Amino acid sequence: MKKILNDNNFVYSNYKKYISFLNKKFASITVADCGKSVLGKTIFGLVIGEGSENILYVGGTHGLEWITSLLLLRFTENLAEVYENNRCICGFNVTDILKNKRLIIIPELNPDGIDISLTGEEGCGIYKQQNLAICNGDFSGWSANARGVDINHNFNADWYTLREKEEKNNIFGPSPGRYGGRYPESEPETKAITRLCRNIDISLLVTFHSQGEEIYYEYGNNTPEKSLYIAKMLSAVTDYTLVKNEGLASSGGLKDWFIEEFGKPAFTVEVGKGKNPLPLTDFDKIYRRLEVMMITGLLF
């Protein structure tokens, strides 16, 4: 992990090597190909556990928020180490938990966007000229995928209302962030995660973003009854604030779609505080607060 804990090392090629390292080191980790990005990068899923009840953790939806991918990789490595040695994390016996649960972790839903955030025009591939134009050559605020679609605005959850809000904010086409695409699920990254959720019975989903130290848990009248209870537990172990959707964050996201589609609990967790991308000097502090939350999420 230390080898990729800096801005220059966490490009996709090194991320892919780290996935391979985890797969070779831990017999308990299965690596799945969940789909491809716009530029053809594999969207990896890391699976651990023996149970029939599936829980899904997702990171790296926004290019700027690549720290969430690193946090999930650290958790995967720690979880596998403890699981294979029959030890505990935060006082919880991991072996007992994973006899009944199976955790699927997607560290990078948007690998192209992360590469663009880290390397600028070098990461844009065939969309280089388009993306140089829409961000005026400044990639420091890049959250979207390679063709300028914000993955977390591309899910079919009140998408058309979200489109109206985008246009009121002068967002009409490909952009560094907050453009929801030509239609719901237009992007391969979005299709990859919706296909996974439709093919596998997921009982609970947590999607990690940054920043704000907040937990979003509801989606209007569709919110499952036990969502608030679980959210309070997640808040209690992190001291993150519970908040409700509003503005451009009120629909179109993975959490919203999962709640509407399946009627099951889903949460957006905004890790850390500051300006994105959050500095890696904050990594250990953020991880210490999140580890117990990620274990707690396996208990429901």
Image (cartoon, helix red, strand yellow):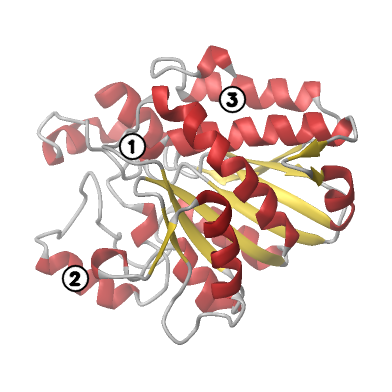
The amino acid beneath tag 1 is Leu
**Label 2: element kind:** helix
Numbered mark located on residue 99 in the image: none
Give the alpha-carbon distance from disc 1 to disc 2, as whole Å.
22 Å
Q: Please name the residue shown 85% across and 61% down the image.
A: 52
25 sits left or right of 255 in the view? right
258 sits left or right of 210 in the view? right
* Residue 127, quarter of the rendered image: top left
**Label 3: element kind:** helix
Residue 48 image offset from top left, x and y in percent: 78, 43
* Residue 46, quarter of the rendered image: top right
Residue that numbered label 2 is attached to: 165
The amino acid beneath tag 3 is Lys
- Whichever of callouts 1 and 2 sits on the residue coming sooner in the sequence is 1
Residue 183 image offset from top left, x and y in percent: 34, 67
Of residues 47 and 273, the one nearer the viewer is 273
Dots 3, 2 in contact, CB < 8 A: no
Residue 4 image offset from top left, x and y in percent: 52, 17
Residue that numbered label 3 is attached to: 16
Residue that numbered label 1 is attached to: 64
Nearest to the eye among marks 3 and 2: give it.
2
Q: Please name the residue shown 43% across and 17% down the image.
A: 6
The amino acid beneath tag 2 is Lys
Callout 2: 10 Å neighbours few (<14), some, many (20+)?
some
Give the alpha-carbon distance from disc 3 to disc 2, as whole Å.
37 Å
Q: Please name the residue shown 59% across and 73% down the image.
A: 229
**Position above or below: 27 against 176:** above
Quadrant in the picture for the C terminus: bottom right
